[in-house]
Image (tube, grey):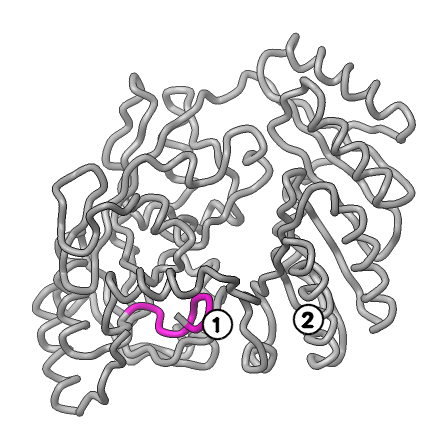
Amino acid sequence: MTPQSPIGVAGIEAAWTDLRAIVGAEHMRAGTAEDALDGVRPQMVIEPANAEEMAKVLKTATNAGLQVIPRGGGTKLDWGNPPRGAQLIISTGRLNHVVEHAWGDMTATVEAGCTVQQLQQTLAEHGQRLALDPLWPEKATIGGILSSNDSGPLRIRFGSLRDLIIGITLALPDGTLAKSGGKVVKNVAGYDLPKLATGALGTLGIITQAIFRLHPVPRTSRTLSFSAPDGSIINAFILAVLDSKLVPTGMQVRAENSPRCDADVRFEGTAAGCDVQVEQVTRLASSLSASRSREGTWDFRSALWAGVEPAVICKFTLLPTNLGAFLDQLRRVAEENHLSWKLVGQALGVGLIRLEGKDPSVLLSAVLELRKNLESRAGALVILGCPVEIKAKTDVWGSPGNALHLMKSIKAQFDPTGTLNPGRFIGGI
């Protein structure tokens, strides 16, 4: 990847003039302290009106040597490493339309700046939904959840974003609008663009539009919660459900500052179908204490972002068979370091933890110990939220494994000048 050269004052002023000509002066403003990302304050924020303007803006920025941060609703903007620089934030705020709901084909085409809640409300008019439950749907945008690959408990039944997305349009740094399933364009032939852009943190291109497969809104939903004295018992129950013929649409484990933990299981469909599955899962959990779900059970993930600071919020991945052992280790590490903790884990081995403590260096030490253990067992631990001083001392993504060379090669093809989100992705990409 070719590093960008320093930009002179005259060059920057010329770039601002060119950008204003593209979007209009009313859609471009000076960056403020509220726009800063990990202490890096952009000089300008710009809002293109459509994909074509987005491509022109990005090409102009690239030609001028500007470093660019794409932004949607901003709910996950602090995920990733601190940027090496950021002269310009490009917002998708005006690309906020549901372009088409082909309800007969059960697909929807939506612009990147549309919020998840807005899309779901439109789809619900025809009894359909995007079977996805990301964090903060009222503010999170389609482009943002794709870039961060954010999904929730519905994943156990309907898959992740990579399973639901069937088409995408990307504005590339050279001004190309690359569309999946369309004409072959330079540097993208042979790539599965929807899957490649999902989870890339906006480092390859700026998503302007996406197409999703849809599912019906269920007639009814039932959730049961089960409690156990320790993680190994809950882990055995989760594995038993996974090994059964039950078809839950959500299954999560919750724990907080104690060996005791809870498992929530959700079924959706007809009332009769849900009743049968509730009866079967209750038999599987005969040794556990059961109760009907409390209000907000499935919002436990978002609650991990509220609490005493300083704190670290991490995403973990592991083999489902290792969840009980990880709970034990998390509790031990927290106790040894005098930290408070919370965990919510999905049945397929993905989850979130929150660690709270007075000393950021102790928090970092605990996180690195947990990460080392997970990585030794084919797992991973990614820091999503933390004080900037912790980000300065570690790569929030952890070990990139043996895929880093390939990832850098792809980055070099899509963004050879390092315009987009410089340094924020895995391995400093």
Can you name the residue that lies furthest to the bottom here? Answer: 9
Looking at the figure, which quarter contains the N terminus? bottom left
At horizontal 27% and vertical 47% (from top left) the residue drawn is 191
Q: Is residue 31 above or below residue 21?
A: below
Q: Amino acid at mark 1?
A: Asn
Q: Amino acid at mark 2?
A: Leu
Q: Which residue is mark 2?
A: 368
Q: Alpha-carbon neighbours of circle 2 within 10 Å: few (<14), some, or many (≥20)?
A: some
Task: Tell me the magenta residue range.
Answer: 420-428
Which of the two marks, 1 or 2, is nearer to us in this view? 2
Query: Marks 2 and 1: in contact by CB < 8 Å?
Result: no
422 falls in the magenta region: yes
Which quadrant of the structure image shows residue 299? top right
Q: Position of residue 332 (x, y in %)?
A: 85, 63
SS at circle 2: helix
Task: Please tell me how crowded label 1 is: few (under 14), some (14-19), or many (20+) other residues with Cα within 10 Å.
Answer: many
373 left or right, relative to 126:
right
**What's the magenta bit mostly, secondary-structure-wise?**
loop
Mark on residue 186? none
> Which quarter of the picture shows residue 304?
bottom right
**Residue nearer the viewer, 154 or 240:** 240
Residue at image mark 1: 81
Q: Secondary structure at mark 1?
A: loop
